[in-house]
Amino acid sequence: MKHRGRASPFLVVAGHHFQLVEGRRYVCGRTKDIVSIKDKQVKRRCRVEEVYELCAEGKIKIPDQARKPKQPVNQHRSYITKMKRKYGFNVEYERRTQTYWVEMPQHAEDLAWDINHHLRDEHGCYDQKEIVDRFEAMAEFMEEYCMEDA
């Protein structure tokens, strides 16, 4: 039997999933871990449906369909971070309700309640654009009522 070296990886279709074998290393679509072919995760008794020797001449190009799509750029992140740092605002995300909860520092929250300001009850946002709008209103409140001494 010919020795399988580093240059000879094999794609094996068996047990209703794929497996890649290179030398004595093994990875499959089920475990997603690179392990020895003797590892207990390896199901060696699966019926082999197909085997392909993988080889390439020259440079390998990954097709665009196989690439993970890039995440869209978050245009509001830097503004939100800057406002949190400048004014001490807080944002928490509640996964269950998919809501962002936005707060001013406690002294400003207390003041909003004391003067019956509309920001006293407005804390829920459903996207980052809403957070930006809320931060602008909260910044105006902070500038008007809380930062006169600064």
Image (tube, grey):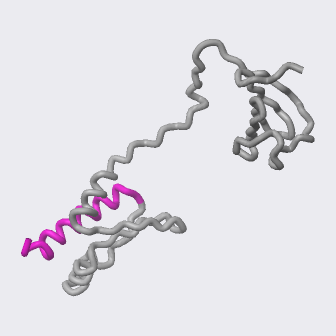
Q: Is residue 135 magenta?
A: yes
23 within the magenta span:
no
76 or 7: nearer the eye? 7
Report the front residue among 7 and 97: 7
Direction top: furthest residue: 57
For the residue pair 61 and 104, the one nearer the viewer reads as 61
Please say if 62 is above or below 115.
above
Which residues are drawn in magenta? 127-150
Which residue sits at x=55%, y=37%? 68
Position of residue 122 measured from the top left corner of the image (x, y, whole percent):
33, 73
Where the C terminus falls, by quadrant? Answer: bottom left
> Is the N terminus in the top left, top right, bottom left or bottom right quadrant?
top right
Residue 56 location, quadrant: top right
The answer to whether residue 90 is left or right of residue 34 is left
- Pinpoint residue 9: horizontal percent, then vertical percent: 74, 26
The residue at 92%/36% (across/down) is 47
